[in-house]
Amino acid sequence: MLNTKKKDNVIYPFKKDTLILRDLLATDRTALANERTLLAYVRTALSLIVAGSSFIKFSDMLLIEVIGYILVPMGIIIGTVGLYRFIVVSKDLKKIKNCSNYHIE
């Protein structure tokens, strides 16, 4: 995982000349892991929203409806947090790729 503590906007503490292909391939693997993590967040958020909605719609018990009203906002919050984390890590990865000599897309 990338270091989230930024010091003077430095993400990768090495000079441009010291980046090698192995570092860039690690960045690509991290980008793919970041996408998988986003998909896991989306899957969890949608599951909570659907479960909460079905609890609200198809339940006659007050307790189950209250649980449904709790699950829907939780799903929205989890989806938002996942999207935010994806965007932050993607920006950091783009900075690493842009400071390298290699341009592999």
Image: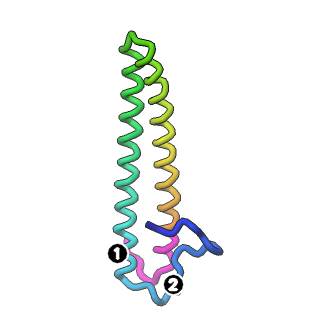
Q: Residues within 10 Å of mark 2 (few under 14, many from 20)?
A: few
Which residue carries the number 1 mark?
25
Name the residue: 38% across, 56% down: 35
Q: Could you say where residue 2 lies in the image, as x and y percent from the top left?
A: 47, 68
Which residue is nearer to you in this view: 48 or 26? 48
Q: Is the residue 38 above or below the residue 70 in the image?
A: below
Q: Is the residue 94 above or below the residue 63 in the image?
A: below
**Magenta-highlighted residues:** 95-105
Task: Decide whether residue 103 is among the magenta residues.
Answer: yes
Question: On the rendered image, what quadrant is the C terminus found in?
Answer: bottom left
Q: On the image, which quarter does residue 20 sit in?
A: bottom left
Which residue carries the number 2 mark?
14
Q: Could you say where residue 28 lies in the image, as x and y percent from the top left?
A: 36, 69
Q: Secondary structure at mark 1?
A: helix
Task: Decide whether residue 28 is among the magenta residues.
Answer: no
Say whether residue 87 is left or right of residue 31.
right
Question: On the rendered image, what quadrant is the N terminus found in?
Answer: bottom left
Can you name the residue that lies furthest to the front here? 63
Q: Which residue type does callout 2 highlight? A: Phe
Name the residue: 58% across, 75% down: 10
Name the residue: 39% across, 64% down: 31
Q: Is the residue 51 above or below the residue 104 in the image?
A: above
Describe the colour scheme in one phrase: rainbow
Q: Secondary structure at mark 2?
A: loop
The majority secondary structure of the magenta stretch comes to loop
Distance from the alpha carbon under mark 2 to that under mark 1: 16 Å
Q: Could you say where residue 7 lies in the image, as x and y percent from the top left?
A: 62, 73
Dot 2 or dot 1, earlier in sequence: 2
Q: Which residue type does callout 1 highlight? A: Leu
Name the residue: 47% across, 61% down: 90
